[in-house]
Image (cartoon, rainbow, N blue to C red):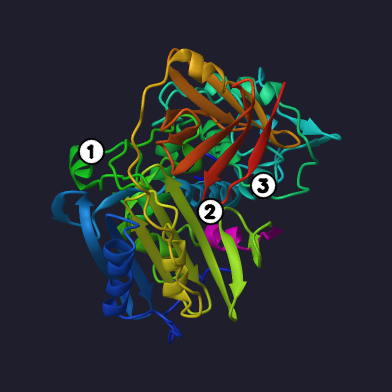
């Protein structure tokens, strides 16, 4: 799950029971994978620990490097658990495809068919949002609901309730036609999971366990953790490689609540590649038959999965990001090869490039940015903070709203939750939930006239508006 201020980021599967065929897999050796992971951790300082897994016709392999937590010498392995973030959306969309195969729903069903009567689902020009629109991020819903105001910015989804969701949906007006444009939406992914759970008269976690992880034997893919799973959970770290809290998504679970390990994810990829017999084979194949355009170069989207065509290959993939983790899973259906990469640090470099490179040797590895520097917070009085309070416009309809509560400044981008901003000087502030900084420009009267957001190598400027 990715956001502007919040680390909130397909061809048909093989037939059920298909015999293995000679693989044209480009998969690198264990030694080469280990070299890549060591470079990312020891030289580029972009993670604390990474587990990578690959699978093809010759079997599965795992390579782990680093540690469970900063300062913790315990090694990682295939049973080490991570928050997989938005890879959860693939499971959510598989629930949809399976429900279609069962005859429980149709892709074209409007979401209003399953929501409580009191909820007024958004419509536009006489067209309703469908289940397929949610799975393909073409519903017209924003990335996040505007009424997401976390009490704890370190766990931003924890107190967002179903009533909050219903209130937002009932009052939201779509700004473009449904199906007209791809816009990645955590709100849409979470809503899809909730709607499917309502249709099945259960909760999201139970539905995933009953329909997917149970039949596939994926005992370590879950939301609630057992005592043993808690011991196996890698500690998440922020871009400065400091420990951060785990996330809870009780309402928008379908968007990114799942935790898993590399062994389970390889089992999932094996099923998608046809190396194991599963009753989900038809649903998995159906996910890749739907194709809609995206704003990502050379990439379309099916149900949940993205598909990128490059270097003569099609790579089916999804990534994930929470405050303390970056993850990637994907496969090459022609080569019948898959890869998963799980990292316990929410750094900007992530692991997307590693995952793609494992499946496509022509896909380059990134040169990550320099590691985040340690920043020191200084106290400012209320009067100094009040001079910065206001509304700043980046573009039409895109604002940064800066507020003060006691001696704490918060910043909220349109469609995002508010995050605490900490002073380094009277005009320089930084966020702790992601690697981002704010620089205020001060006018002759001492009040801020503009603000510059520094994040991911970009420095957009927003002028203050009344």
Nearer to the camera, 230 or 3 = 3
- Identity of the residue drawn at 42% across and 57% down: 350
In the depicted structure, whether residue 436 falls above or below residue 77:
above
- Residue 350 belongs to magenta span: no
Of the two numbered discs 2 and 1 on the same chain, state the one appearing first in sequence. 1
Residue 432 percent across, percent down from the top left: 40, 36
- Identity of the residue drawn at 60% across and 81% down: 312
**Which quadrant of the figure has residue 295?**
bottom right
From which residue to which does the magenta span run?
282-293
**Distance of mark 1 from mark 3, alpha carbons?**
35 Å
Circle 3: element type: loop
Of the two numbered discs 2 and 3 on the same chain, state the one appearing first in sequence. 3
Circle 2: element type: loop
In the depicted structure, whether residue 336 falls above or below residue 52:
below
**Distance of mark 2 from mark 3, alpha carbons?**
22 Å
Extreme front residue here? 444
Res. 177 visible in picture: yes
**Dot 3, crowdedness within 10 Å: few (<14), some or many (≥20)?**
some
Nearer to the camera, 376 or 196 = 376
Is 434 positioned to the left or the right of 416 in the image?
left
Reading the image, the residue beneath label 1 is: 226
Tag 1–tag 3 contact (CB < 8 Å):
no
Q: In which quarter of the image is the C terminus?
A: top right
**Dot 1, crowdedness within 10 Å: few (<14), some or many (≥20)?**
few
- Identity of the residue drawn at 61% across and 72% down: 309
Of the two numbered discs 1 and 3 on the same chain, state the one appearing first in sequence. 3
Residue 337 percent across, percent down from the top left: 43, 74
Which mark identifies residue 457?
2
């Amino acid at each position: 799950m990715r956001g502007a201020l919040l680390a909130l980021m397909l061809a048909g599967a093989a037939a059920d029971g298909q015999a293995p065929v000679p693989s044209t897999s480009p998969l690198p050796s264990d030694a080469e994978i280990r070299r890549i992971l060591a470079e990312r951790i020891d030289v580029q300082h972009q993670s604390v620990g990474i587990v990578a897994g690959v699978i093809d016709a010759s079997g599965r392999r795992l390579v782990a490097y680093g540690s469970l937590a900063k300062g913790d010498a315990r090694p990682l392995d295939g049973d080490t658990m991570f928050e997989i973030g938005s890879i959860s959306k693939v499971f959510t969309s598989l629930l949809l495809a399976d429900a279609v195969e069962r005859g429980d729903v149709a892709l074209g069903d409007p979401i209003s068919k399953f929501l409580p009567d009191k909820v007024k689902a958004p419509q536009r020009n006489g067209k309703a949002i469908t289940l397929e629109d949610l799975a393909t991020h073409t519903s017209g819903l924003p990335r996040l609901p505007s009424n997401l105001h976390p009490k704890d910015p370190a766990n931003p989804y924890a107190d967002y309730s179903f009533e909050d969701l219903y209130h937002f949906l009932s009052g939201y007006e779509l700004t473009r036609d449904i199906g007209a444009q791809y816009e990645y939406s955590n709100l849409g992914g979470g809503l899809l999971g909730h709607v499917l759970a309502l249709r099945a008269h259960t909760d999201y976690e139970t539905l995933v366990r009953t329909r997917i992880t149970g039949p596939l034997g994926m005992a370590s893919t879950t939301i609630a953790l057992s005592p043993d799973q808690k011991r196996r959970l890698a500690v998440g770290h922020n871009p400065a490689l400091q420990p951060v809290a785990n996330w809870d998504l009780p309402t928008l679970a379908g968007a990114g609540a799942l935790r898993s390990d590399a062994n389970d994810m390889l089992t999932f990829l094996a099923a998608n590649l046809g190396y194991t017999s599963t009753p989900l084979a038809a649903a998995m194949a159906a996910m890749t038959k739907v194709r809609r355009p995206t704003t990502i170069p050379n990439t379309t989207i099916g149900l949940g999965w993205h598909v990128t065509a490059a270097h003569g290959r099609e790579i089916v993939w999804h990534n994930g990001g929470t405050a303390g983790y970056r993850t990637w899973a994907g496969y090459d259906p022609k080569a019948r090869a898959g890869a998963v990469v799980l990292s316990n640090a929410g750094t900007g470099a992530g692991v997307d490039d590693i995952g793609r490179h494992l499946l496509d040797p022509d896909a380059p590895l990134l040169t990550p940015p320099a590691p985040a520097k340690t920043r020191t917070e200084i106290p400012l009085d209320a009067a100094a903070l009040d001079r910065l309070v206001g509304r700043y416009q980046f573009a039409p309809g895109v604002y940064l709203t800066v507020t003060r509560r006691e001696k704490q400044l918060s910043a909220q981008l349109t469609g995002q939750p508010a995050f605490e901003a900490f002073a380094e000087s009277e005009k320089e502030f930084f966020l702790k939930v992601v690697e981002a900084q704010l620089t205020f420009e001060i006018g002759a009267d001492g009040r801020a006239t503009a603000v510059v957001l520094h994040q991911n190598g970009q420095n957009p400027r927003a002028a203050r508006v009344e």
